[in-house]
Image (tube, rainbow, N blue to C red):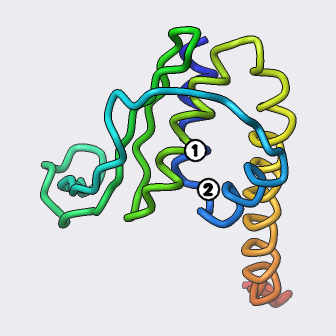
Amino acid sequence: MIEKRKSWMSLLAISDQNDLLNLWDQKKIKISYEWLRQPEIGSIMAQGKMGVTGDKFNIGEVTITRCSVKLDCGTIGHSYVQGRSKRKAEISAVCDALLQTKMSKEVNENIIIPLEKIKKDKRDKILSKAEATKVDFFTLVRGESD
């Protein structure tokens, strides 16, 4: 369960705001919940590392929005998303909570799987553009003998 949750929370966090909101609006899921933490905007320090053995260093700050909700059944959902979209953070937290309930199959089929497909399609498009610029180098060996 923990690995699955990491996977869907990561997908919700990195997905495009418009894609997530469109899928949510299309499904028209009506669910009641209470706020544990209303969406709030803040920042975190991003760190980098040179090579495998290099020391960590601060790259800069990244804006995030976090949110926590509690469904009427008691299930809690959290979200941390990059950027300043309070609505995306809210929907991501609700999806996290719903994916831990009996509605997980419905949310998975209507939100998570389409987001995975969108992510794959975008990646494939980038890779195909890169493939179009690929240059193959080869060396011809002359048949001279000493």
Height in image: 110 above or below 35?
Answer: below
Residue displayed at 77% across by 32% down: 107
Q: Is residue 119 visible?
A: yes
Report whether 84 appears left or right of 45: right
- Residue 106 lies left or right of residue 14; in this view the side is right
Which is more toward the observer, 117 or 99? 99
Residue 86 relative to residue 12: left or right: left
Work out whether 97 lies above or below 50: above
Residue at 13% from the left image edge and 59% from the top image edge:
58
The residue lying at 34 percent from left, 41 percent from top is 38
Q: Quadrant of residue 103?
A: top right
Residue under pointer 2: 15
Q: CA distance from mark 1 to mark 2?
A: 12 Å
**Mark 1 belongs to which amino acid?**
Ile
**Quadrant assignment for the C terminus:** bottom right
Closest to the observer, 84 or 130: 84
**Residue 12: x percent and y percent?**
59, 45
Residue where numbered disc 1 is placed: 91
Q: Mark 2: which amino acid?
A: Ser
How far across and down, in percent of the image, does residue 11 sit?
61, 44
Please tell me whether residue 115 is drawn above or below residue 96 in the rendered image.
Answer: below
Expressed as whole percent of the image width and height from the top left, the position of residue 98 reads 65, 24
Q: Find residue 105 and name its label.
A: none
| Residue 144 picture location, percent across and down | 80, 89
Crowd class of label 2 (few under 14; some 14 to 19; many from 20; radius 10 Å) = many
- Point out the tag, 1 or 2, that comes first from the N-terminus: 2
Quadrant including the N terminus: top right
